[in-house]
Amino acid sequence: MKHGDASWALRFNGVGSAFATELGSAMATIERDGVPWLTIDCGGEGLSACIAHYGAYPSALFITHAHLDHVSGFERLFVGAFFEKTRLDEARRGKVKLYVPAPLVPLLHQRIGEYPNVLAEGGANFWDAFQLIPVGDAFWHDGVRLEVFPVRHHWPQTAFGLRLKGALVWSGDTRPIAEMLARFANDDELIAHDCGLHGNPSHSGIDDLEREYAPELLARCVLYHYNGTADGEALAARGHRIAHPNEIIALREPTALRAGNVPLDR
């Protein structure tokens, strides 16, 4: 799990569905050497847990999709990224890196960026607080390459998963995606997977995963986005690993490309 003196882990800031607020909105942070490295999504309860644990706002985020239980923390993140002790701090403008799959950019703007005159006194735009980085099939963060892939949630090209090769696959909200995991989880990664006790047209149920995933693939899954404590206990009783709020899971050393390991070419 180590590369030199670096170690990797995944901390679940929240594990619940939109209805299970007591479990926190589904959100997680990849840690490197015990320090937050990249946060996945920005739900309200999940952001509160993230700030409470780290004592600071996230400095880099990847957004899986624009449903409000995954982006409702953005107004507070805007304030945290722009202010210091209630004083406008221009030095913090544009410092929060925000990696967003390109098809989501207009949807995210409609959801969180269009409110007029975001500061009552004027002088700022919503996106001034962030370094907005639209991404395609892959992107670089802190010298490490991460991969992005579409998942099956609600409507085509509106939700995406994330892979840190060799360490982690985050499914995001999705129906079963056996064909995507065959491609993007083929290096023994931990798979954090959307799963409730019962499925629906936008989310996986445990019957869906047991039917469509091989046992060896399910054995690598840790399930989140379930509908409450009782549902989580029922999933665990069927022999599956479930995520818990603020749980931290050690990750294998990524095999993802590093900037120093690839030739510079244009």
Image: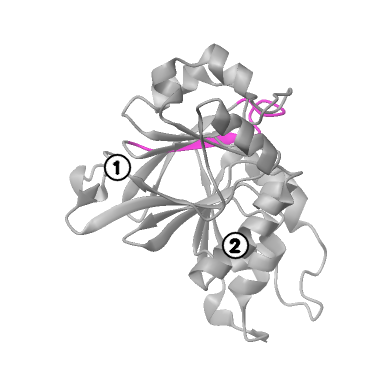
- The circle on residue 196 is none
Marked residue nearer the N-terminal end (1 or 2): 2
* Above/below status of 154 relative to 44: above
Position in image of residue 39 (x %, y %): 50, 54
Quadrant for residue 195, please give it.
Answer: top right
Residue at image mark 1: 252
Secondary structure, mark 2, is helix
Marks 1 and 2 close (CB-CB < 8 Å) = no
Position in image of residue 45 (x %, y %): 67, 58
Three-letter code for the amino acid on which mark 1 is drawn: Arg
Can residue 128 be seen? yes
Magenta residues, as a range?
152-165
Position in image of residue 9 (x %, y %): 37, 51
Residue 94 falls left or right of residue 125: left
Secondary structure, mark 1, is loop
**Which residue occupies 76% across, 50% down?**
111
- Nearer to the camera, 116 or 160: 160
Main SS class of the magenta portion in the image: loop
Q: How is the image coloured?
A: one colour
**Which residue occupies 40% across, 35% down?**
190
**Which residue occupies 39% across, 42% down?**
146
Residue 232 falls left or right of residue 200: left
Position in image of residue 74 (x %, y %): 67, 60
**Which residue occupies 74% across, 55% down?**
112
Give the spatial CA distance, label 1 vs label 2: 25 Å
- Is 79 contained in the magenta span? no
Residue at image mark 2: 49
- Disc tally is 2
